[in-house]
Image (cartoon, coloured by chain):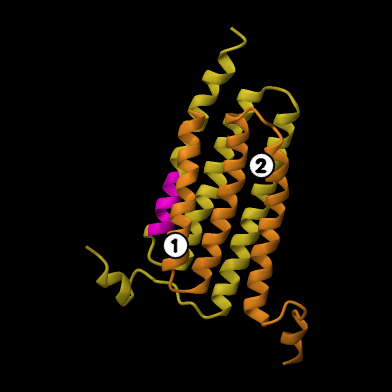
Chain colours: A yellow, B orange
Amino acid sequence: MSEWWPEILSWPFLAAGSFFYVVGLIGLVRMPDVYTRMHAASVSDTFGAALLLIGMMFISGLSLVTAKLIVILLILLFTGPVATHALARAARYAKVEPVLSNSEEAKSSKR
Amino acid sequence: MITAATLAVALAHLFGVWRALKGPTVFDRVLAANTIGVAAILLLALLGFLTERPEFLDIGITYGLLNLIGTLAVLKFFRYGDLARGAENDAAK
């Protein structure tokens, strides 16, 4: 039993990770504004990547591979918000206006 | 299941390139580059599991750090016009 249950236990994590990753990518393609696109990309960077990496940790058990996967997870969790914050600050400094819900662009694109 | 996850992460490269080509502002393109970088790290980890070679994880760790430094360097260049100067230009004005 100890040779197949880690693989079966990793399947829901890999499936959920792929689902959240694709949801974030669809948001990156279809959102109307650079700020909302950043938010969607951070969903895939945090949720999708964390669930995928935890699913892979179940397959590899307690070994050096799991330690390296934990290091990759910590790097992604620490550098993701830093990059998003710097990008949002730079966009605001360059006077990129956000699309608000009562602006003309939002009203024209509403179906 | 690892194959399905690899296909899902490989979509990130296509969508990222589409956003990099289409995005009206330069910050869309920097965001697309960052997303492609994170997708490359995950793709390296998943391919390491598919081909039974754990050496790919070391490359993933290295590229994780390089991706952040690259994004911040591009943003600094667009704000200050120069990678050598920094916030003292704002203080001098």
Please state the extent of the stretch shown in magenta in the rendering.
A22-29
In-image side of B57 versus A96 (left or right): right
Task: Measuring from the top left, give residue A25's x and y in whole percent.
Answer: 44, 51
Q: Mark 2: which amino acid?
A: Leu
- Magenta region includes residue B15: no
Disc 1 crowd rating (10 Å Cα; few below 14, some 14-19, many 20+) is: many
Query: What is the residue that sits farthest to the left in this orientation?
Result: A111
Which corner quadrant of the image does residue B72 belong to?
Answer: bottom right
Q: Which residue is mark 2?
A: A73
Disc 2 crowd rating (10 Å Cα; few below 14, some 14-19, many 20+) is: many
User: What residue is shown at x 30% (from left), y 77% (from top)?
Assistant: A104
- Magenta region includes residue A28: yes
Task: Measuring from the top left, give residue B5's x and y in whole percent.
Answer: 49, 36
User: What residue is shown at x 42% (from left), y 60% (from top)?
Assistant: B18
Q: Can residue B71 be seen in the rendering of this structure? A: yes
Query: What is the residue that sits farthest to the bottom in this orientation?
Result: B93
Q: Can residue A36 be seen in the rendering of this structure? A: no
Q: What's the CA distance linking mark 1 and mark 2?
A: 25 Å
Choose between A48 and A97: the one closer to the eye: A48
**Which structural element holds mark 1?**
helix
Q: Give the prevailing secondary structure in the magenta stretch.
A: helix
- Give the answer, above or below, for where A58 lies relative to A26: above
User: What residue is shown at x 52% (from left), y 19% (from top)?
Assistant: A8
Q: Which residue is mark 1?
A: B19
Task: Measuring from the top left, give residue A9's x and y in whole percent.
Answer: 54, 21
Quadrant in the picture for the C terminus of chain B: bottom right
Which corner quadrant of the image does residue B37 belong to?
Answer: bottom right
- Give the answer, above or below, for where B86 lies relative to B42: below
